[in-house]
Image: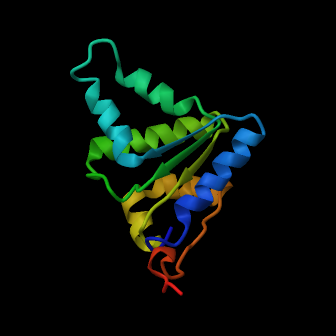
Amino acid sequence: LGNRGAGKSQMAVCAIRESCHNLKNAKYIKALNFFLAIRATYKDEKETEIGVVHDFLSPFLLVIDAVENRGETPFENMLLNHLIDMRYDQCKDTIIISNQNEKEFAASMGPSIVDRIHECGIKIICNQKSFRRQEKK
């Protein structure tokens, strides 16, 4: 959680590299792309919502970036909660990245996801200044 440009996605990339180094597959997505993949099934008779969810359940490590960039509709919230809950049931690692502070994140994600994080996860708060906006020497 934290400021834009504070290195959250870069830390996730390091986790992905470590997972792959240990021969465990990983996948990186932006939250919006998960919902767009679900919506694409409405026009594609070959792909199903269950199939899309399965694609995101299969990797050992799933990184979901930019969770603040979603509509937060009841359907999206239910789908995201379902995905994270199913991954939890399968003992698979999930990294959730957000440009929100703790309070905004908790309100946005809901009590079930926040409770899962408290039970068996960690929060990393990145409140340092953006690495993208540092002065050039």
User: Which residue is most to the top?
Assistant: 46
For the image, the number of numbered tags is 0
Q: Residue at x 55, y 74 (%)?
A: 126
Is 92 drawn above or below residue 105 in the view shown?
Answer: above
* Picture coordinates of residue 108, whole percent (x, y): 37, 60
Is 25 drawn above or below residue 45 in the view shown?
Answer: below
* Picture coordinates of residue 38, whole percent (x, y): 32, 31
Q: Residue at x 78, y 39 (%)?
A: 22
Q: Write down the quadrant of residue 103 in the picture.
A: bottom left
* Picture coordinates of residue 17, whole percent (x, y): 68, 47
Q: Which residue is drawn at 43% across and 71% down?
A: 4
112 and 99: which is toward the camera: 99
Q: How are the residues colored?
A: rainbow
User: Which residue is most to the left?
Assistant: 43
102 and 136: which is toward the camera: 136
* Picture coordinates of residue 113, whole percent (x, y): 50, 52
Left or right of 71? Residue 1 is right
User: Which residue is most to the right?
Assistant: 22
Q: Write down the quadrant of residue 36 in the picture.
A: top left
Quarter holding the C terminus?
Answer: bottom right
Is 100 drawn above or below residue 38 in the view shown?
Answer: below
Is 71 drawn above or below residue 3 in the view shown?
Answer: above
